[in-house]
Amino acid sequence: MIKKLIQLFWFEKTKKEEEHRTLRKNFARIRRHGLLGMIERLNKEYEQIDQDYITKSILNARYAKLKLRSVFLVGFLLSSFYIVFLKSELYESKTALIVRDMNQNPTTSTLGLSLLGMGSSSQLQDSKIVEEYLKSLDVYTLVDQKFHLTEHYKSDAIDFVERLSDDATQEEVLDFYNKHLIVYYDEVSGILSVAFAHVDPKKAQEILEFLVQNVDYQINEFNRKKAKKQLTFVEGEFSKAKEKMEHSTAELEAYQNKHLLLDPTTEAISSSGIIAELEASLTQKQIEYATKKSYLNEDNFELVNLKNEIIQIKQTIEKTKKSLTGNEKNPLNKVLIAYEKLKMQLEFDTEVYKNALIQLETTKIDVAKNDKTLSVVSKPNLPDGYTYPNKPKAFITILIITLLMYGIFSMLSQIIKDHKE
């Protein structure tokens, strides 16, 4: 009926000899004959259009174009109305952060990268870790416990188009949270920009402050967890090194007690000195004996005494040498070699123990200290105006898209029409 009414309106308007009265006549008919009477008379008047094929074709084409325009016009008006009047206005709080490594020497580690206009690789890695952490489910769980974001995302505070359904999954809620969280890292300055959008500007600021506090703690917690694992390993190695050192000490002490020697090396040096003195004395006595033998009888008391001294010295030398390298049960050289092995083992175990102790103390310091520091360049602000949506920009964008789509559909319709003809 609407189509017939519009086409009759166009038809009468184009006839110059008749007054354009379609709408006025139909209102009068409704008052006089009712709706059914108006439709009956409208159909009779429409028969004259059906009898004229050319006129009917022109009016049908014109009506089809009107329908296409109406569809795009209605779509444009509904979209604009939604953007301007219904879409939730989000207030965005912003902050800027810098993650620094306290163990890194800035003059050497970042010089080359600074010349290239880039931050250090460590700073980039730490910033990316912060970004992924802020977008993680763990952080959202903490934020949700404090600010009840899931309940908010399903409430009437969010417009009906973007609002989450009551049976939304955990992944959908997390995606919705990440849509409102904006994290950007500037590789040139090394600044990590973080923003959070909420329908309440105060809530946006509080949530962002909570995120910054949580990141400040967590960024060092990553390193502490790593250091604690390393500490457990170092403590085990330190205990092993200490046990080995104590075992080596006990073995060396037992060996000294067994052989009644404090230091076999000193004993060997002393024995070698005694042998040297005895050999020098033997040489002197032999010379003296040979000299006196030339003018004394062999049974002379002096010669006999010298001969006995020479024999005694030789026996002493031989006995001393045997104590060093002879066939005794525990010759001194064997004792010395075994002692040196035990002493070297003790020195090695002691050195390992020292290194393990140093490593243990260093690791304990690493666990206690903060290797990373989060510097807040600008604190989370309290926005005084909404950031999203940008209504003028959205309106112009919808208008351009509508015109483009209308032009494309019009062109396609004309191509199809020409192809049929």
Image (spheres, helix red, strand yellow):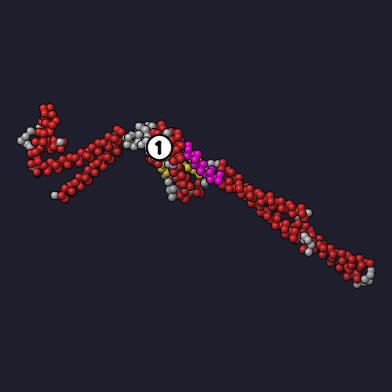
Q: Which image quarter is the N terminus in?
A: top left
User: Is residue 262 toward the left or the right of residue 131 in the image?
Assistant: right
Residue in front for this viewpoint, 29 or 133: 29
Residue in front for this viewpoint, 49 or 287: 49
Residue at the (38%, 38%) spot, across then down: 168
Classed neighbour count for the residue bearing mark 1: other residues with Cα under 10 Å, few (<14), some (14–19), many (≥20): many
In the rendered image, residue 189, in percent from the top left (x then y), is placed at: 43, 44
In the rendered image, residue 323, in percent from the top left (x then y), is placed at: 79, 61
> On screen, 336 above or below 159?
below
Residue at the (70%, 51%) spot, across then down: 249
Q: Is residue 216 magenta?
A: yes
Residue at the (68%, 49%) spot, across then down: 246
In the rendered image, residue 88, in percent from the top left (x then y), is placed at: 34, 34
Asked whether residue 133 appears in the rendered view, the answer is yes
Label 1 sits on residue = 196
Name of the residue lying farthest toward the bottom? 294
Residue in front for this viewpoint, 390 or 81: 81
Q: Amino acid at mark 1?
A: Phe
Q: Which residues are magenta?
A: 209-229
User: Is residue 188 toward the left or the right of residue 104 in the image?
Assistant: left
